[in-house]
Amino acid sequence: MNFSSQLITWYKINSRDLPWRLTNDPYKIWLSEIILQQTKVQQGLPYFNNFIREFPTIFDLANSSEDKVLKLWQGLGYYSRARNLHFTAKYICSSCNGNFPQNYKDILNLKGVGEYTASAISSFAFNKNYAVLDGNVIRVLSRVFGIYSYFDTSSGKKQFKKLADFNLPLIDSYTYNQAIMEFGALVCTPKTPKCINCIFQDECYAFNNSKVQILPKKQNKIKVKNRYLNFLIVSIGDNILLKKKNKGIWSGLYEFPSLEFKKNISKNNVVESSQWINFFYENNFQINNISPTIVHKLSHQKLHIKFFHIQCDKVKRNTYQLFKKDQLLQLPVSKAIENYLIQSVI
């Protein structure tokens, strides 16, 4: 049996029962692919189910508010995915009468859709012969065939794409694409692959040459940046001050006023800083509590966060709005703020 046939046979016995595999509806397949970008299946599945329950059709998603979309997305991270999802739903409904594009290039031109996602939608929704190439696929191909090229370089991407296309069978390419991704997710995993039970044990280059932990190779390692944030939970009467961000990783989410410094500094240094003085502008304030430093890790940032609980008569509102305390958990916020709100008393 050749490579693709072995994978298909394995898949038919070992595949997971996932809802987006039980349909060829391009809306549901597109939704699942956007959710599963940089998200594992077990984490993404509840979000997929919640989205389908709230937005059974693409028209429902398009007609929703951004706040509702982001609230449902809350906790998944990479919030630009949700904003692009909402934008694209509105585009398809207004410009395509709600009909999802079927041509690969048209799918690729949709906001938030890259080559992998366009190939996946083309294959899974429209049964077209496009090879998918995500992290799972790259890992399987690199290990089995002994590919040392850096997968995040232009030349490396071309080599993996060529190999993926070469292995794509003309018949049952849909099942093959599902199979190789599933194999990477369940067997040929990043850190602890199940090599002992692998169907490619005899042929696998990495296994037979002790290179499993080396392949695949990535040239550009993620540089993690430390940031030091001080969130100000400002109570004015029974209201809390927040604003909706319009840029950055948490664009579209609501956030407390924040002061950022180059390092972790003391309470006195925070209060004496020009940022603090400019914010309160001679208005009286009382600090009721300061949280310990909370470390929140993102893929490319390590956030060191303190929450200041402050009572104040008034501040310069600028772009901030007042919300009742019982509204806070109804608003889309970052996971860092959500976690704090759940376990603290405001």
Image (tube, rainbow, N blue to C red):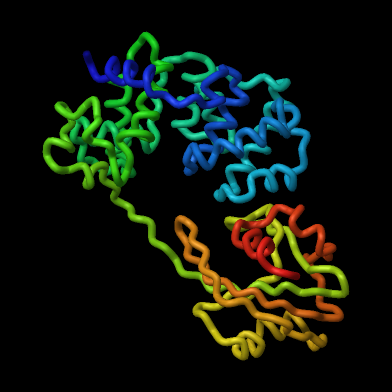
Q: Nearer the viewer, residue 154 or 300?
A: 300
Residue 63: x %, y % from top left: 78, 34
> At 73% from the left edge and 34% from the top edge, which residue is drawn?
54
**Quadrant of the frame with the C terminus:** bottom right
Position of 38 relative to 20 (above/below): below
Lateral position of residue 57 relative to residue 161, left or right: right
Lateral position of residue 278 relative to residue 125, left or right: right
> At 23% from the left edge and 40% from the top edge, which residue is drawn?
149
> At 29% from the left edge and 18% from the top edge, which residue is drawn?
4
Position of 203 relative to 209 (above/below): above
Position of 127 relative to 251 (above/below): above
Residue 236: x %, y % from top left: 84, 74
Residue 276: x %, y % from top left: 69, 82
> At 55% from the left edge and 78% from the top edge, which residue is drawn?
261
**Quadrant of the frame with the N terminus:** top left
Q: Residue furthest top?
A: 171
Lateral position of residue 151 relative to residue 42, left or right: left
Residue 102: x %, y % from top left: 56, 17
